[in-house]
Amino acid sequence: MDISFLETVWFVLVGVLLGMFTITGGFDFGAGISLGFSTEANRRDFTIRSIAPFWDANQVWLITAGGALFAAFPRAYSQMLSLMYTPVIILLLLLVLRVVGTEFYHLENNQKWRKFWSGIVFISSLLSAVLAGVALGAVFDGRLFVPYDGFWDGFLRLFTPLSICAGVLYAAFFAAYGAIFLAVRAGDDEYASSLKKLSKILQAVLMCVFIIYAVVLLMKLRQTPQYLPHAAFGILISYVCLSASARFVRRSKYRSAFVLDALFALLAIATHCMVSYPFIIPAETVNAGLDISAAASSPTTLTIMLVVAGVGVPLALAYNIYAWRVFRSDKTGNESR
């Protein structure tokens, strides 16, 4: 296979965009998951109020990642969507439900209805995280090249030990990351102590889930021993980062823990990209699958889109930074919209 520099750049860029969605969307999805552990109306109000200013800016990265995949690797895009049609549709419906729940929560004054809509946000956030993790795990596990017969067989083939662990890991990361985000925003408010206790528990759960996932991943990579050193190194660095974050959480240094959790996510995604390269859709068979050269657009398209990305990505990042700076210290009790 003949891999060009442009194709490699776009492979890295798609990975970066996926990482940006994970670390930006992760905390607001995680905040939504934390609603499942909230029994107080004031804490639910605070959580929804914390999500509202950020969710739209964070979803930009998911849209951008999808657009980049379509523009740079159209064959991979079509293959992923056609073979994962069901989980993609379910995920989109869950994302819509999540937005509806967030918006309708603000429109209701009745506490029963507010509790109902917060439950919708919790369920949709949790299932979205699990399903996204399962889908990514299935792609990495080479399940898109497994023959299937019928609708349900095509859906169920995505569930393997690795993809299921990936789904649980994604949800555990979002939950812990979101709890830390809320602990940062809560400061010394009345519900700060319960959020800080929750973040400590969820961070410990995340570490346990990551260890299980790492074991399953390394067992899978025994078939390709040439990738084991890269994977082992990435896992080790990610675990060190996660351990440091857990220590900061125990010391109530939540801003540092938040940054380290974000770094952990980027390192984990980078490790998977490094192991799968040059295949954008790996297969179960060694050195098989769809490589970036076969999946890529023409050099002209890649060049033009790289210029567009050079303008669009900094603008999206600037929008995220602006939203964070404007709403980072909102503790007024007003519903920031």
Image (tube, grey):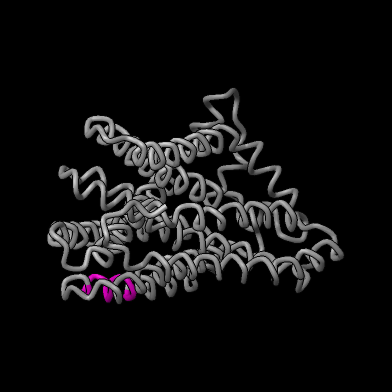
Residue 36 x %, y %: 24, 42
**Occupied quadrant, residue 326:** bottom left
Helix, strand or loop: magenta stretch: helix
Q: Residue at x 48, y 41 (%)?
A: 95
Establish if 110 lies above or below 183.
above
Question: Over which residues does the magenta segment extend?
Answer: 240-248
Number of marks in picture: 0
Q: From the top left corner, tell me how far across and down residue 270 is, in percent.
A: 51, 68
Picture quadrant of residue 279: bottom right
Give the image quarter of residue 329.
bottom left
Tell me, yes or no, whether the highlighted magenta stretch contains residue 247. Answer: yes
Q: Look at the image and say whether residue 110 sits in the magenta stretch.
A: no
Q: Residue at x 77, y 56 (%)?
A: 294
- Left or right, 253 with respect to 317, comes to left
Q: Is residue 333 above or below residue 100?
A: below
State the image coordinates of residue 85 (x, y, percent, origin top left). 60, 34
Tell me: residue 297, above or below residue 107.
below
Residue 86 in picture, x, y percent from top left: 55, 32
In front: 84, or 98?
A: 98
Q: Residue at x 21, y 68 (%)?
A: 187
Residue 169 visible in rendering = no
Q: Is residue 179 left or right of residue 63?
A: left
Task: Name the residue at the top extreme.
Answer: 150
Looking at the figure, which quarter contains the N terminus? bottom right
